[in-house]
Amino acid sequence: MEFNHADLFEGLADVVGERVAAVCGSERVTYAELEAQANRLAHHLAAHGIGAGDHVGIQLYNGIEYLTGLLATLKLRAVPINVNYRYVEAELRYLYTDSDMAALIFDAEFGPRVAAAAAQAPRLRHLIAVGGPAESAIPWPTALSGMPDTRDFPARSGQDVYIIYTGGTTGLPKGVMWHTEDLFMAFGGGNPWGAPLTSPDAVIEQARNAGPLTMMAAAPLMHGAAQMGTFITWWMGGTMVYVPKFDAQEVLAAIEREKVITLNITGDAMARPLADAIATGAYDLSSLFVMSSTGAILTGTVRDRLQELLPNTMIMDSFGSTESGYTAAAVAGSSPESGLKYQPNANSTMAVLDAALQPVRPGSGEMGTVAKTGRIAFGYYNDPQKTAETFVTDPAGVTWLLTGDLAMVEEDGTMRVFGRGSQCINTGGEKVFPEEVEAVLKGHPAVFDAVVTGIPDDHWGHRVAAVVEPRPDLPVTADDLTAHCRTRLASYKIPRTYAFVPQIHRSPAGKADYRWAREQAQAAK
C-alpha cells in the first residue's frame, strides 16, 4: 500500500466496509458499496481505453456519482479533473482543451453545453451521462452494468498525479498538479495538529480504531476543499455528508438529521445565509462542535453573529490554498477589519520571504510574500511560465511555493496577512487590500455582500470601487456607505465608485469573481 488515495480507500473498505462513507440527500453508501461501484466504473473506463495518465473530467453536482468517478479514476492511475458546473460553452471548451481531457462524466442537465464544447476538444473521446440521456454519451447505469466489482488494476504509486483546477477568480482556471503522497500529507493526512502518520497502514489502523464521526462539506465537490475534506473524513473512518447544491436550509436540516459534528464552509457567501437560517431557531444544531471556513475569509461581523447564534460551536478560519494545503489557523481577534493574523501549524514549513527569497525578520515590519516548502504542489498543468513564477528555488537550493499573499511576521511568529498582491489596489501610491474594505462594507446592516476592486482613474492611476448587493428589505445609498466607511477606514481606502447589483457573482464554492466585479464597477463609473 502507498500513500495513494485509491490504495488507502481500498484499505478502508477492507476494514470498515460496513460503515457509511457518504450521505447526500436521501442517498447513503457504505465504504464497501462505494468501493464496489468505483471498481465497476473503473473497469468500464479501462474497457474504453482510459488508463494511467489519462485525464477524466467530472462535471456533476454533489452526489455519490461524483465520489464514484473520483475513486474510479484514481484506481486506474488516471487523473481527475474537476469541472465547474456553472461554466458556459466557451469556458468548458477552454477547460476541456487545456486539461487534455480524455473522458468526461457529466450531469445530463448540462448535455447541450457539453456536446457543443466536447466537439471542439480534440482529445475528449468518451462521455458518460448521469441522470438521463445525453447526446453521444453512455448512460451511467449502462456504464456500470455487467462490470466486475473486483480489483484488477495496475500497482499505484505515491508519485501518481492528482490535478485540482482553481476557480479562476482573476484569470483563466489553472490546473494545480500534486503527487498523491504530498497531497495526502499537505491536506490533513500529515496530521498538522499532532504526530504525523508515518505509514499507510497507520492510516487504516487509525480509521479502524476511530469512533463515530460525521462531518459535512457545504461546498461543492468540484471545489478542492470539499474533495480534500472528504478524504480527511475517510482517513478517520468517518461519514461525509453533502447536499446536492448549497442551500442553507438543506445544510442545517442535514446537520440535524445526521448529527454532524464539523461543518466546512467557504467564507461569508455561505456563512451569511446560514446565519439567517440559524436565526429562525428551526433546527437542532446541538451536535455541531466546529464550523470551519476555508478558501475564503470570514469577516468579523459575520463570525461574531455565528458565534452568538452558536455559542457552543467553535468558529474557525483556516489559511491555505490549492497549491499549499492547510497551513495555518487564525488567532483570536483575527478578521479583515482588525487585521488578519495566523499561527502556522506545528508541522508547517511556512515563511514570509523578501525579494531575495530570504525570510523576513520577525518584528521588523518588513512586508514579504507568504511561502511554503516541503509538501507542496509541483506546478501548473500546461503552464510552464506560471509554474516558474510560482515555484521558485532559493540560493540554498530549497524550492518554495510563493502563494501571492503579502504578510509581515510579528515578534511572536504569527503572520499578519494583508491580502493577495494580485488584488492589491494602488491608488495614488497608497496600497489598498480589497479584503479589508469588503469586510467594512459587509459590516453595514443593509449590505448582504460586497466585492471591492480597482478601476482606472485619470488622476490617481486606480480608484477603489465597490460592487454591492444590498439586503432586499433595507435600502442603502452610496452616501450611506461612504459615511459608514469614514469612521472605519482611512480616506484613501474608501470606495469612490459604487455599483449596486441584485446579486454578487461568486463561484459555487463562494469565491468572488473579480473580473465580473471590475466590469460592473467600470460600467458604473
Image: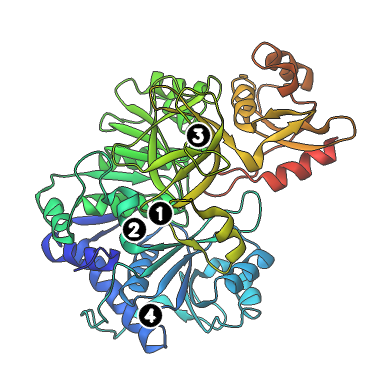
Q: Position of residue 309 (x, y in %)?
A: 39, 21
**Residue 376, numbered label:** 1
Locate the C terminus and report the quarter of the image it occupies: top right
| Disc 1 secondary structure class | loop
| Disc 3 secondary structure class | loop
**Which of marks 1 and 3 precedes in the sequence?**
3
Q: Which residue was labeled with disc 4?
A: 52
**Which of marks 4 and 1 precedes in the sequence?**
4
**Which of marks 2 and 4 precedes in the sequence?**
4
**Which of marks 2 and 1 precedes in the sequence?**
2
Q: Position of residue 439 (x, y in %)?
A: 59, 26
Task: Indicate which label's residue lies in the foreground, 4 or 2.
Answer: 2
Query: Residue 353 versus residue 486: which sits nearer the camera?
Result: 353
Q: Amino acid at mark 2?
A: Asp
440 displayed left or right of 254? right
Give the distance between the C-alpha atoms of the residues marked 1 and 4, in whole angstroms. Answer: 22 Å
For the point 48% across and 33% down, the residue is: 271
For the point 74% across and 33% down, the residue is: 426
Question: Would you say the residues marked 4 and 2 are in contact, meaning their CB atoms lie under 8 Å apart?
Answer: no
**Residue 297, numbered label:** 3
**Which of marks 4 and 3 precedes in the sequence?**
4
For the point 64% across and 68% down, the residue is: 94
438 displayed left or right of 401? right
Q: Residues within 10 Å of mark 1 (few under 14, many from 20)?
A: many
